[in-house]
Amino acid sequence: FAFVEEIRSLWESGRWKIDWHGTAHSGYSHSTSSSATRRFTQFFSDEVTGPNLYEVNERFVKPLTREAGGMSYALMKHPSGLLCQIFISHAWAEGIFELGDHVRRAWPRMHRLHNLYCCLLANPQNLDMSTWLDGPPAETPFARAMQSASHVLIIPNSTVGIYTRLWCVYEAYLGTQYKKTCIMPARPKTTAQCRILFLTVLLPIVIGLVSGLALVLIPLEDLHLKMMADGLFLMAFLTTILCFGISPTFKLFKGKCPHRCIHQNMNILRAIHVVLMCILTLVAFPWTMLPGPHFTPSNFDHYFILFGTWLFNILRVTQLNEELLEDREL
């Protein structure tokens, strides 16, 4: 991540320019091959995608490591070397900022892993890499690094399908042969999580609070209001139990039913939980404000059932949000 931020800082500072021929310049004096020039993309000026790895290699990694002695960027930063813990399978046509975002979102959590193998940084780019690949594929630096890693991150991009690249296909094969844990960047972006949290949790709670307050202010007899609140709560409680019973069936048929069908059913289930959460928030006002049992240990269940059911619906909405967002990312 420090490398990506270093490139971003260079890119944002304006030291990396593009002339009218479409060729990028970063202030380093060096020659650029025609094949590398052809690989420059329209994403160079895109702050989400950024320059692709061909551009980063030609304009940053090669000049910097050449001046340091010709070793790899990783060895330049860590002369003693680091043990490979995570291997990433990706295509160089992706933007460097997009790569950093996907790696961050796919990073295994709670495993205390720190070291990542990225061929751009791990291999000495100023050498003729074809000589490294002449032998058996299983003895290449890529295969040896994957043997050491515990996880393989499969990093897609918006430019090209990674499995149109033969090396990515071979890396997928090796990952299954070595029985590695393969992960894709399915973790949703923070902006998407905040947006869906507002629409499915915060907004329904606010609507329920306003509706509950309005219900209490309506000039109705306490008995009628209490009967209405009890009826709404009983309906919400029984529906919550029904939804809880239906949920395991989705998991049983997830691999058998069409993906679109499962997705639609999960959206319907989430919508029901959102409505239930709104109703339970509405019921909370008359349930607690009308004359009735005071909050004491002896009548704890009077309040616990309501707030327990309300909390359960919030947790289910949050869980379904996460599953649907991850499904969308995949």
Image (tube, rainbow, N blue to C red):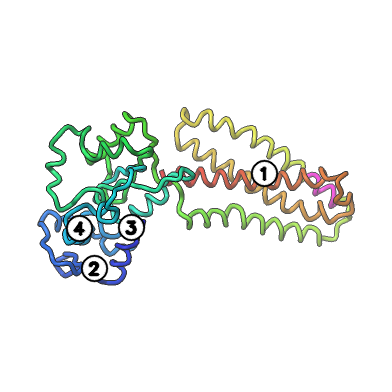
Is 133 or 273 nearer to us in this picture?
133
What's under tag 4, amino acid-wise? Thr
Residue 27 placement, left or right of 8: left
Q: CA distance from mark 1 to mark 4?
A: 55 Å
Q: Is residue 248 visible?
A: yes
Q: Secondary structure at mark 3?
A: helix
Residue identified by numbered label 4: 65
Question: Image quadrant of residue 131?
Answer: top left
Callout 3 touching callout 2 (CB < 8 Å): no
Residue identified by numbered label 1: 312
Q: CA distance from mark 1 to mark 3?
A: 38 Å
Tag nearer the camera, 1 or 4: 4
Question: Image quadrant of residue 60?
Answer: bottom left
Q: Quadrant of the C terminus?
A: top left
- Residue 187 is situated, as x and y percent measured from the top left of the image, at 45, 47
Question: Image quadrant of residue 136?
Answer: top left
Residue 273 placement, left or right of 212: left
Residue identified by numbered label 2: 16
